[in-house]
Amino acid sequence: MTFTLARHPAVVVPRRVALAERTVLAPGFVRLRLVESSPGELAGFDAPGSGDHFRMVVALDAQGQPAGASSTYTAVAWQVEAEPRWVDLDVVLHDDQDDAVGEPAAEPRAGVARWAASAPIGAPAVIAGPKGSVLMTGRPERALLAGDDTAVPALRRYLGMLGAGTRGDLLLETRHDPRALGLEVPAGVELSILPPVPHDPGAAITAALTDRPRPLPAPDADAGADGHDVFVFVCAEQSVVAPARAMLARWGIPVEQAVVKGYWKR
């Protein structure tokens, strides 16, 4: 079987929310539930793509408008068709850093991770997005999924979307028990825990990708297939991007038919 990925833009809508719950999943890994600050703020929110993310600001001015730098987060779960309307996200608290689950912000953080760890229930914030979705049509023969703690929400959603019959590999750079993070790995997926290299985030993933052989023979170029047979997701610290793209080139997979991103930068 083959699959394709298509990117669909969306209109970015700012939404005022408040912290409703905080749950510690593992040391330095928390889940937040955000509820709408007033009726209708979260109406229409959707994140259909497994890696869909939204931008969040916790520094607000006197009028409740965004007034500082922001961070981005993968949407874990949400309920917007009935009250109470809410969105869940996970936040990773790196040692001596202020980083969150999701893609990196180009500008400095505005204390979002500290807010996630210690803000009182009811604390206000603003979220905006997702600005688009990456949707899969068809089903890959195999999958290679690789990430660190910041990629766990997207990994959960991709594993759920691919389903119980998924075959492939999951490379997880973490010190945590995957079960504590809510990762349910299908029987056909081989999980490899990659212990993080001290002071060198992403190094373990980079080593695992370097010279990695293609899991299936490259499709015959004369076959005329429009899709691809191996789905690749590699998201972690920024340093993993170059080796992941080099692997895609070796495997003959266009970057547009994979998901490779730096979710944060040391």
Image (cartoon, grey):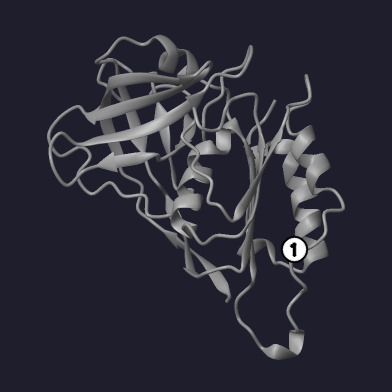
Q: Residue at x 70, y 89 (%)?
A: 223
Indicate the position of residue 91 as horizontal and vertical percent values. 48, 26
Count the marks: how many? 1
Quadrant for residue 15, please give it: top left
Q: Residue furthest front?
A: 187
Q: Quadrant of the C terminus?
A: top right
Q: To which residue does mark 1 refer? A: 215
Residue 234 vs residue 107, the one in the foreground: 234
**183 or 83, which lies in front?**
183
Helix, strand or loop for disc 1? loop
- Nearest the viewer among 170 and 82 is 170
Q: Is residue 134 left or right of residue 10?
A: right
What is the quadrant of residue 236 in the picture?
top right
Write down the quadrant of residue 127 in the picture. top left
At x 52% / y 69%, what residue is drawn?
139
Image position of 187 with respect to 59: above or below: below
